[in-house]
Every structure is written in structure tokens, then in C-alpha cells.
Image: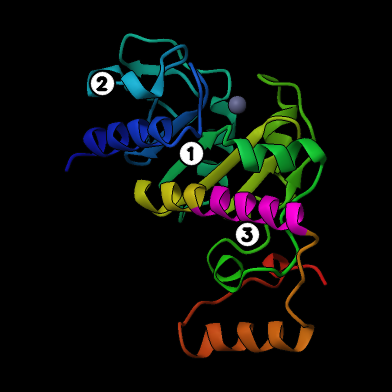
Amino acid sequence: MSLREELTLYCHKVYEKEYVSAYDGNLSARIDNKRILITPSGKCKGEIKEDDLLEIDYDGNLLEGKGKVSTEVKIHLLVYKLRKDIHSVIHCHPPYSTAFAALGEGLNRPVFPEVILSLGKVPLCKYGTPSTDELPNSMLPYVDFSWAFLLENHGAVTIGKNVKGAYFRMEKLEHAAKTLFIARLLGREKTIPLQKLKELYSLAEEVYGIKIDDRNKMDY
Ligand SMILES: [Zn+2]
């Protein structure tokens, strides 16, 4: 599958899953060290075709394609510049995750073991006015080590070594936020005891070979 086909497929997926509405969100993938493939502004992700995708440089200038570059491109450029291991960035407004972002709450407490291992701590990035540098700057304190970000009063960003990886983190984030929301309807979630959390982290390294950055470990 070409990168264009893959990015188009996941554009359709985020719309089907209702992680975006109308023209919301943007998805991108690194082509090489000069070019990034990204969705154009003002197009519904559910209707995106391969030819609609734009090629831009690392300053956000349009190199190829007919559409307009989104003002949210700065989020993508920041990640690609600072994280050489990352090849895809997805920004959506998934309702449950965005509800936590609207509450001003990151997902940083140890509740679900799988989420702890796959997403790590999901920080709340301080509210920034869309299209300004405030938005990427709000991600700066976390971009070196995080895989998923909540943007205060706005939405969510996930990143990955490929498009599928970034997409699955978005799916996992929204599922965790939805489950937490339901838990709070029933009462209040319990966190995993500190000793058990330490066990999980050592198991992750020994058994799964997952090296978790200390800065990405859950708050206790
Ligand atoms: Zn947005």
C-alpha cells in the first residue's frame, strides 16, 4: 500500500469512528527528510481522496497539490522536527478525550495497565489559540517523550512510527477516555496500587522489552 493510500484509509477511519466532525482534524505522514504528506484544510476526512493530499516541506510550504495547508500544520511540523523516530501525526477531536481536555484533565493516573504501557501518561497541553504558535508551544514540554497529547479545550494528538501506529493510539486514547467516563458515572475509578504499578513497569522492560521514559510514567 502506498503512503497516500494508507493515509487516505485512516482519514476515512477517523471519520467513521466519529473522532472528527465536518472538516475537523488533520492527518500526516513523513515522506522523506524534505517532504510531508498532509490532509488539506476544509475537506471532510470521510471524503478525502488520495489526490487531495498535499505535499509540504518542513516549513509548511506547499510543494504539490491543489488544496490549502491547514493552520494546524504547526502541530505536525513540531513533532517531525523534534522526533526523528516519528513518521505519522494524527490530530482529531474525539468526544470523550476532548471532554477530558475540556475539563482540564490529562489522563495521567494509573488505571488501565494496557493504556499505561501503550500510551504512557497523556499530558494536558495548555490551551493555545488555534493557528498561532501557542498551540505547538503547548506541546513542547512533552513532545520529546509522549505518544498521545490532550489539547486543552480543543482535542487530541497521537503520533507513531507509522500511520497505523498513530491511528491505534488515537483509538486507544478515545477508548480509555470513554471507559473512564463510564467508570465515573458509576462512581470513581480506582488507581492501580503503587507497588503493582512498579511491577508493571519492570515487567514491561523484562518481558515486553518496552523501555518507558521516566518522564512518561504515570503520576502517583
Ligand atoms: Zn483541531
Q: Does residue 70 appear to the left or right of 198 in the view shown?
A: left
Of the residues tagged 2 and 3, which is closer to the observer?
2
Picture quarter with the C terminus: bottom right
Q: Can residue 135 be seen here?
A: yes
137 shown above or below 192:
above
Helix, strand or loop at disc 1? strand
Kindly indicate whether the residue at mark 3 contacts the one at mark 2 (C-beta within 8 angstroms). Answer: no
Residue 145 image label: 3
Q: Does residue 38 appear to the left or right of 2 in the view shown?
A: right
**Residue under the point 56% across and 71% down:** 117
Q: Earlier in the sequence, mark 3 or mark 1?
A: 1
* Magenta region includes residue 137: no
Q: Residue furthest left?
A: 1
**Residue under the point 59% across and 56% down:** 176
**What amino acid type should be assigned to the residue bearing mark 1?**
Ile
Q: Nearer the viewer, residue 77 or 97?
A: 97
The number of numbered discs placed on residues in the rendered structure image is 3
Q: Earlier in the sequence, mark 2 or mark 3?
A: 2
Residue 183: x, y in percent?
Answer: 70, 58
* Magenta region includes residue 174: yes
Residue 90 image label: 1
Q: Nearer the viewer, residue 103 or 217?
A: 103
Q: Which residue is mark 2?
A: 49
| Main SS class of the magenta portion in the image | helix
Q: Residues within 10 Å of mark 1 (few under 14, many from 20)?
A: many
**Residue under the point 51% across and 18% down:** 70
Picture quarter with the N terminus: top left
| Marks 2 and 3, how far apart at CA | 33 Å
Q: Earlier in the sequence, mark 1 or mark 2?
A: 2
Helix, strand or loop at disc 2? loop
Q: Tell me the quadrant of ligand 1.
A: top right
